[in-house]
Image: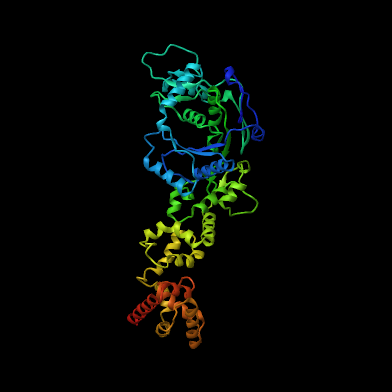
């Protein structure tokens, strides 16, 4: 037994009488927990879908169960191979591993037709010959009477079909009783069957509709827990009734609230509702994104950061808040910064490989890449920014920031840089400690603070007035590169003079 409840008029084999909570259900022998994530490849995987996938993955993994991926690609006009690839790549990048090969609905059409025929034969479905004009007239009359527009069951009782008329197949929804859903997030939801119409389960071209394919897949895949967005709540009672008609066990439902922008409106691109892979391209760490997603609607005290093991240990789908969550790009960026700052340079380098390659840096051949990462990680909000800041170690500046040059290449800067070239030539071994001592000696000789000495050097080697600590920067840059870049700055100053 799993969950939930439906009462009404059903064949004897369907009278299961479920109406139990998950706590009660788990006190009895239970099948392995099986959850699923069913994206539609009509676009890319977005934040909301990624959060649903995470919640489903956690719920299955916590119980030693299975997490399955289903590609709902029955809309062949809008579904694309590019979107399928993007979904699979997103799941791999987030490390939300799934058991078994993905199930593609487009490959299961024979199975759906088999179930539709079964429902027709058993009397739980019927052919409807109403035209669009018939349906519009029906709704117009209902609205005039102040009634909720819905199909009135005109073809429900067998009647001779019109000659050569096209037909759809409708599910014969019970007209009595209620559907009761003990939702793990929303609590008990009760729907009167009289509020539900006889929904179409097969179109006039025989293709199955969403509510039919989902039911058949969940039944065949042995799904025990359906975790999905709360925009599906209206579908749930209809799907439960179809499951009951098929004599199937009912899954436990958990409807996750939607995500809103900071202005309280539904998420859009301007709020950050872009493809998950866009966050990868923008330089976010996958675990930082997962950590942020788990905190959208769920909390564990005041804790902000969660390792993967902590997520598995602490997360409880029943503790997800019932109200909508608010997405904050600033909070996500802060969390990403915290993870970059705390990560081992080698781990960051693994995730930043593509960003370095895009910048023309071969991390296998270039020396000092890991050192550059180490020096810049506590100053970078994204991997993209980390790579940009690291480029100074592999490319001499092609220009000097005008503001920085005007400020730090004037006065006695040329004399100081000339003295530093001579002093740096004598440093052996070339190390941050020896460089630091040398800079201090020059500063004391001129009666200046260290910053007055360091800034001209920083602009000379980096082209800007910002870099990691100057002694560590020069140590990693190397003696010859340091001398060459200071000389190039002196030549620039001389031309300006």
Whether 17 is drawn above or below 445: the answer is above
Residue 199, horizontal then vertical, whole percent: 49, 25
Whether 140 is drawn above or below 65: the answer is above
Residue 24, horizontal then vertical, whole percent: 67, 33
Of residues 400 and 292, which is closer to you in this image? 292
The answer to whether residue 68 shows anywhere in this view is yes
The answer to whether residue 146 shows anywhere in this view is no
Is the N terminus in the top left, top right, bottom left or bottom right quadrant?
top right
The quadrant in which residue 338 appears is bottom right
Whether 70 is drawn above or below 414: the answer is above
Whether 328 is drawn above or below 448: the answer is above
Is the C terminus in the top left, top right, bottom left or bottom right quadrant?
bottom left
Residue 197, horizontal then vertical, whole percent: 52, 24
The quadrant in which residue 422 appears is bottom left
Q: Tag count in the figure?
A: 0
Residue 434 relative to residue 486: left or right: right
Of residues 57 and 411, which is closer to you in this image? 57
Residue 277 relative to residue 240: left or right: left
Residue 75, horizontal then vertical, whole percent: 40, 33
Residue lying furthest top: 160
Of residues 65 and 161, which is closer to you in this image? 65
Residue lying furthest left: 495
Give the colour scheme shown.
Answer: rainbow
């Amino acid at each position: 037994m799993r969950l939930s409840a439906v009462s009404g008029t059903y064949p004897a084999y369907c009278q299961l009488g479920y109406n139990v909570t998950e706590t009660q259900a788990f006190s009895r022998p239970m099948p392995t927990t099986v959850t699923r994530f069913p994206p539609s490849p009509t676009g890319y995987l977005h934040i909301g879908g990624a959060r649903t996938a995470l919640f489903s993955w956690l719920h299955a993994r916590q119980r030693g169960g299975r997490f399955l991926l289903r590609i709902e690609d029955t809309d062949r006009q809008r579904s694309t191979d590019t979107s399928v690839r993007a979904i699979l790549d997103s799941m791999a990048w987030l490390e939300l591993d799934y058991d078994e090969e993905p199930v593609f609905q487009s490959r299961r059409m024979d199975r759906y037709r088999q179930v539709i025929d079964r429902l027709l034969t058993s009397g739980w479905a019927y052919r409807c010959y109403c035209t669009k004009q018939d349906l519009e007239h029906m709704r117009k009359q209902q609205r005039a009477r102040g009634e909720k527009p819905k199909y009135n069951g005109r073809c429900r009782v067998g009647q001779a079909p019109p000659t050569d008329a096209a037909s759809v197949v409708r599910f014969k929804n019970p007209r009595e009783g209620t559907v009761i859903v003990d939702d793990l997030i929303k609590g008990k939801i009760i729907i009167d069957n009289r509020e539900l119409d006889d929904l179409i389960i097969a179109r006039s071209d025989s293709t199955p509709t969403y509510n039919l394919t989902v039911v058949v897949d969940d039944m065949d895949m042995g799904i025990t827990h359906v975790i999905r967005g709360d925009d599906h709540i209206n579908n749930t009672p209809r799907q439960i009734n179809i499951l009951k008609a098929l004599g199937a066990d009912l899954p436990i439902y958990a409807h996750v609230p939607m995500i809103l922008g900071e202005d309280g409106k539904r998420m859009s691109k301007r709020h950050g509702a872009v493809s998950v892979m866009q966050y990868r391209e923008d330089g976010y760490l996958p675990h930082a994104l997962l950590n942020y997603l788990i905190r959208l609607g769920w909390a564990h005290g005041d804790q902000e950061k969660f390792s993967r093991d902590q997520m598995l240990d602490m997360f409880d789908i029943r503790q997800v808040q019932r109200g909508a969550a608010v997405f904050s790009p600033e909070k996500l960026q802060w969390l990403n910064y915290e993870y970059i700052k705390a990560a081992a340079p080698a781990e960051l380098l693994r995730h930043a490989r593509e960003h370095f390659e895009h910048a023309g840096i071969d991390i296998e051949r270039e020396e000092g890449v890991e050192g550059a990462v180490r020096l810049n990680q506590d100053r970078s909000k994204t991997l993209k920014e980390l790579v940009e800041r690291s480029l100074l170690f592999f490319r001499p500046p092609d220009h000097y920031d005008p503001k920085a040059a005007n400020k730090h290449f004037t006065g006695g800067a040329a004399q100081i840089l000339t003295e530093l070239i001579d002093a740096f030539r004598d440093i052996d071994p070339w190390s941050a400690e020896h460089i630091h001592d040398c800079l201090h000696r020059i500063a004391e000789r001129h009666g200046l603070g260290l910053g007055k000495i360091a800034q001209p050097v920083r602009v000379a080697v980096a082209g800007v007035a910002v870099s990691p600590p100057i002694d560590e920067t020069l140590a990693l840059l190397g003696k010859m590169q340091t001398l060459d870049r200071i000389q190039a700055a002196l030549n620039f100053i001389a031309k300006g003079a």
